[in-house]
Image (cartoon, helix red, strand yellow):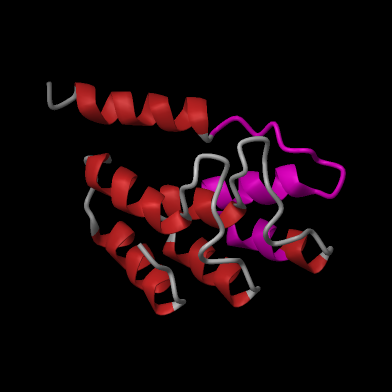
Amino acid sequence: MRLFLPVAVIFLALSWFGSAAAADHEGCLALHDAAWTGDTSQLESMLRQGVGVDCRDTKGLTALMKAALMGSPAAVRLLLHNGAGVNVKDNSGSTALSYVMIFGIFSGEDMGDFDDVFRLLKNAGAVE
């Protein structure tokens, strides 16, 4: 049962968040992919090219939400520094902080990175 929970969470995350069916006419897909993988060099490049920091995928998720979900403090910090909306809600009404609180608990990983992301979001004004 212990192994099943992390596998189930990963499957859910990939099926819900991993699909990058974002409208890519403005580079949103690449920004979301970089946030998902925590690739801060690619994030910086896309933002320098003028990709909107809060561009959304088809489910309404932003790059900040995906970086938070993956527990990537460096990506979250970079996106916040570039003006990402900390309290933006997706189509289901969830925020980046919501995802940290839900998926951080069930990830089965060391909570250190999720704790760091939680603090970054709260310090930036995220509300529960």
Looking at the image, which residue is at 50% across and 25% down? 15
Q: Position of residue 100 (x, y in %)?
A: 36, 53
Q: In this view, does 23 lie to the left or right of 4?
A: right
Image: 42 above or below 81: above
Boundaries of the magenta span: 18-44
The answer to which of 117 and 126 lies nearer the viewer is 126
Q: Is residue 101 left or right of residue 46?
A: left
Looking at the image, which residue is at 46% across and 55% down? 96
Was residue 29 drawn as part of the magenta stretch in this picture? yes
Q: Quadrant of residue 7?
A: top left
The answer to which of 47 and 91 lies nearer the viewer is 91
Was residue 30 drawn as part of the magenta stretch in this picture? yes
| Rendered-image quadrant of the C terminus | bottom left
Q: Which residue lies furthest to the left in this view?
A: 1
| Rendered-image quadrant of the N terminus | top left
Q: In which quarter of the image is residue 106?
A: top left
Looking at the image, which residue is at 79% across and 38% down? 23
Image: 35 above or below 124: above
Q: Position of residue 80 (x, y in %)?
A: 56, 71
Q: In this view, does 18 lie to the left or right of 10?
A: right
The answer to which of 71 and 124 lies nearer the viewer is 124
Q: Where is residue 40 in the image (x, y as percent from the top left)?
A: 59, 61
Q: In this view, does 31 lie to the left or right of 10?
A: right
Q: How many marks?
A: 0
Looking at the image, which residue is at 54% across and 33% down? 18
